[in-house]
Image: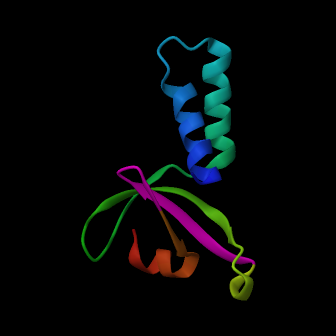
Amino acid sequence: MSMLRTMVEFRDRYINMRDASAEQVKFGKTLKSVIFDKWENVTNIKNGNHYTLLSEDIINATNDRDGQKMTLYTKGGKLYVRENKEFQSKFE
């Protein structure tokens, strides 16, 4: 399991726990804001599908593209990544 997925599941567990203490809920919300800074609804221009934008401050660490800025977005429990300029041209 990827580190990001583990962090998301951990965050969701604390945000959504019905029996969580106030401290645990506060921790989960803080974790959410640290990991993902956006949480905006976006729409794919081509197909009209709706996604949630999580962050535009992801760094591509692939050797030949090291340092490239990426956008992270999600739908249906899946995470997607696109280069920032490409994302901006395909979503509104």
Looking at the image, which is closer to me, 31 or 39? 31
Q: Position of residue 55 (x, y in %)?
A: 59, 58
Q: In the rendered view, would you say 65 is above or below 73?
A: below
Furthest residue in direction bottom, as rendered = 64
Q: Check if residue 69 falls in the magenta segment.
A: yes
Specify how the rendered protein is coloured.
rainbow
Q: Residue at x 61, y 52 (%)?
A: 4
Q: Quadrant of residue 31?
A: top right
The reply, left or right, for residue 17 in relation to residue 23 is left
Query: Is residue 37 visible to the viewer in this orientation of the structure?
Result: no
Q: Position of residue 78 (x, y in %)?
A: 42, 56
Q: Position of residue 72 (x, y in %)?
A: 54, 62
Q: Residue at x 61, y 72 (%)?
A: 70
The kind of secondary structure the magenta stretch mainly shows is strand
The reply, left or right, for residue 61 in relation to residue 54 is right
Please give the count of numbered marks on the rendered protein: 0
Q: In the rendered view, would you say 56 is above or below 19?
A: below
Q: In the rendered view, would you say 45 is above or below 22?
A: below
Q: Check if residue 68 falls in the magenta segment.
A: yes
Looking at the image, which is closer to me, 82 or 46? 82
Q: Which segment did they paint magenta?
A: 67-79
Q: Residue at x 61, y 40 (%)?
A: 32
The quarter in which the C terminus is drawn is bottom left
Furthest residue in direction front, as rendered = 1
Looking at the image, which is closer to me, 1 or 74? 1
Q: Residue at x 68, y 27 (%)?
A: 27
Query: Is residue 45 visible to the viewer in this orientation of the structure?
Result: yes
